């Protein structure tokens, strides 16, 4: 079988070497398409691939239509909003992600961003500490849990809101359960977003929630830019000169935010939450192993389009 790794943002070399060992060790061949700039290159590369490993690369119905031999696509990472699951299902292609494999990298970045904003973007001036502050975690999944665990070490009070996780699971970690999103935003000096981008969550974080944050509040987004209502973000940052926004990947309106709010806003140019050697290796190798296991035994653990 031919396994294609198609990554506009490539894996670290150690991850690619590991993927190659697994794929070739199982008797398959590996093809690489890295740092491609034109979607036509992806179209050409998938034409004879039996399996596909991607990161945030968009696997659209146009890609699927050209991938005549494709049997499985694995998103090496957590969020799968880049996969057209319906198109995969239509062609009986199994789609998977690798949940949990890059969570620690994202969680560490969320904490790092909180420190960066608390310390005035590492420029002179008196900042503040995380200790004693309340951190609200919106969605208590793999990343949210790790952020809670690390933040505890800083002496923060942790609250979480997640309608899909039971109160018992949250409170056994010593985390206070917020009864509503309103409560989470009202009581948290920092809110850290860990929700996926879905039809329900897109543009769901806007004026009503952010304006509830206490004085000096900071919204931390290492999830997806799409979950923010950007117009309302501009409005609330204009009205509330004390609030801050930090995001892993620039919002569409970043130029306006930079111009209007200066150091109160910071965004990475390219999504870098999972950009560590460890996360690349964990997610990349997991993807390769999942593909080889699927071909060897039909294993469908982590299938998304059931
Ligand atoms: C994820 O959903 O796993 C993260 O956002 C990482 O995405 P990336 O592989 O594009 O860095």
Image (tube, rainbow, N blue to C red):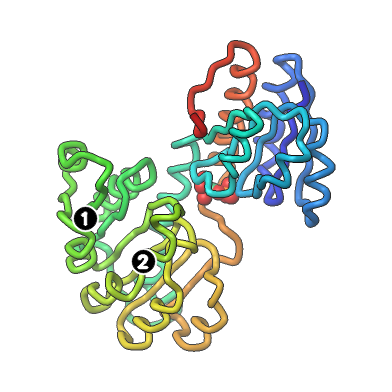
Query: Residue 237 bears which disc, if any?
Result: none
CA distance for labels 2 and 1: 27 Å
- How crowded is the residue under tag 2: few (<14 C-alpha within 10 Å), some, or many (20+)? some
The residue beneath circle 2 is 205
Q: Is residue 274 visible?
A: no
Q: Residue at x 27, y 55 (%)?
A: 154
Q: Say which of 240 and 297 sits in front.
A: 297
Q: Nearer the viewer, mark 2 or mark 1?
A: 2
Residue 156: quadrant of the picture:
bottom left
Q: Mark 2 or mark 1, which has the lower sequence index? A: 1
Disc 1, SS: loop
Q: Is residue 69 visible?
A: yes
Left or right of 45 on screen, residue 243: left
Residue 173, horizontal then vertical, whole percent: 20, 40
Establish whether ligand 1 lies closer than 8 Å to the Cβ of label 1.
no
Residue 157, horizontal then vertical, whole percent: 19, 56
Establish whether ligand 1 lies closer than 8 Å to the Cβ of label 2.
no
Left or right of 288 on screen, residue 232: left
Judge whether 297 appears above or below 152 on screen. above
Query: Residue 155 bears which disc, if any?
Result: 1
Left or right of 298 on screen, residue 119: left
């Amino acid at each position: 079988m031919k396994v294609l790794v198609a990554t506009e943002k490539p894996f670290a070399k150690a991850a690619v070497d590991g993927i190659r060992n697994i794929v070739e060790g199982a008797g398959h061949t590996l093809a690489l398409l890295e740092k491609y700039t034109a979607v036509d290159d992806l179209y050409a590369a998938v034409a004879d691939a039996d399996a596909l490993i991607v990161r945030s690369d968009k696997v659209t119905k146009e890609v699927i239509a050209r991938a005549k031999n494709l049997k499985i696509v694995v998103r090496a990472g957590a969020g799968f909003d880049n996969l057209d699951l319906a198109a995969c299902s239509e062609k009986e292609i199994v789609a998977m992600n690798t949940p949990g494999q890059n969570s620690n990298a994202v969680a560490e970045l969320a904490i790092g961003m909180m420190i960066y904003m608390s310390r005035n973007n590492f420029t002179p001036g008196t900042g503040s500490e995380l200790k004693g502050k309340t951190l609200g975690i919106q969605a208590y999944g793999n990343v949210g849990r790790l952020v809670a665990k690390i933040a505890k070490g800083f002496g923060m009070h942790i609250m979480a809101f997640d309608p899909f996780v039971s109160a018992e699971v949250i409170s056994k970690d010593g985390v206070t359960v917020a009864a509503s999103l309103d409560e989470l935003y009202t009581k948290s000096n920092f809110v850290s977003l860990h929700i996926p981008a879905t039809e329900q969550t897109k543009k769901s974080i806007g004026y009503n929630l952010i304006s509830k944050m206490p004085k000096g509040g900071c919204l931390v987004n290492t999830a997806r830019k799409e979950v923010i209502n950007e117009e309302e973000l501009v409005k609330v940052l204009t009205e509330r000169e004390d609030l801050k926004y930090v995001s892993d990947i620039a919002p569409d309106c970043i130029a306006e935010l930079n111009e209007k709010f200066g150091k109160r806003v910071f965004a990475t140019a390219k999504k870098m939450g999972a950009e560590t050697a460890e996360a690349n290796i964990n997610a990349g190798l997991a993807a390769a192993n999942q593909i080889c296991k699927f071909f060897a035994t039909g294993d469908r653990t982590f299938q998304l389009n059931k």
